[in-house]
């Protein structure tokens, strides 16, 4: 069941794209979603905003160089063909309830 969206910017990804560096205020949300699947979201400030894929949270670690940040380790990204909006997701669910995403909830608390 998908409950969270992970709001990420390009500069938050590690070079190998296996983790994102987030403010430590996201620690509880990241730990609650350990080994869970979350939606990946790019804000309107990004080149292609919207929900762009799914990813599993594989680990959460402190940033040893900067205590105000954490690293969230991610599995391989399951990318969508194009970024989508919540309206597009819910429109698809309403018109075609047999697809694999009917478990989405009305609101996505976001880790950012």
Image (tube, rainbow, N blue to C red):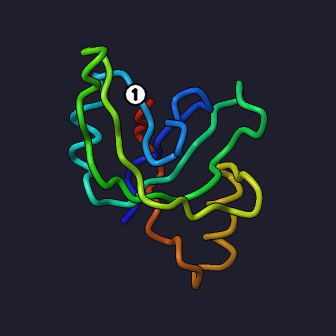
**Residue that extends furthest to the bottom in the rendered view of this protein:** 98
Please tell me which residue is depicted at 52% across the width and 45% down the height of the picture: 16
Viewport quadrant of the C terminus: top left
Q: Nearer the viewer, residue 90 or 15?
A: 15
Give me the residue at 54% from left, 37% from top: 15
Residue 111 place in picture, x, y as percent: 40, 35
How many marks on residues?
Answer: 1
Query: In the rendered image, which residue does mark 1 sit on?
Result: 22
Identify the secondary structure beneath mark 1.
strand
The residue under the point 77% across, 57% down is 82
Label 1, residues with CA under 10 Å away: few <14, some 14-19, many ≥20:
many
Decide: is 49 above or below 45: below
| In this rendering, position of residue 24 left or right of residue 102 | left
Q: Tell which of 97 and 83 is nearer to you.
A: 83
Q: Quadrant of residue 88?
A: bottom right
Residue 75 spot, x, y in % from top left = 42, 59
Q: Is residue 58 left or right of residue 49?
A: left
Would you place residue 67 above or below residue 93 in this image? above
| Residue 50 image point, x, y percent | 68, 43
**Residue 16 position (above or below residue 65):** below
Image quadrant occupied by the N terminus: bottom left
Residue at (22%, 47%) from the top-left corner? 32
Query: Looking at the picture, does residue 21 appear above or below residue 81?
Result: above
Q: Position of residue 67 (x, y in %)?
A: 24, 15
Position of 28 compared to 89: left or right? left
């Amino acid at each position: 069941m998908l409950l969270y969206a992970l709001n990420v910017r390009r500069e938050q990804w590690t070079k190998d794209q296996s983790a994102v560096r987030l403010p430590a205020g996201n620690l509880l949300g990241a730990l609650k979603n350990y080994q869970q699947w979350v939606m990946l979201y790019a804000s309107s400030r990004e080149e292609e905003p919207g929900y762009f894929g799914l990813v599993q949270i594989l680990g959460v670690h402190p940033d040893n160089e900067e205590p105000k940040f954490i690293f969230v380790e991610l599995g391989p990204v399951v990318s969508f063909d194009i970024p989508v909006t919540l309206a597009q997701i819910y429109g698809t669910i309403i018109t075609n309830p047999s697809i694999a995403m009917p478990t989405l909830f009305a609101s996505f608390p976001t880790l950012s």
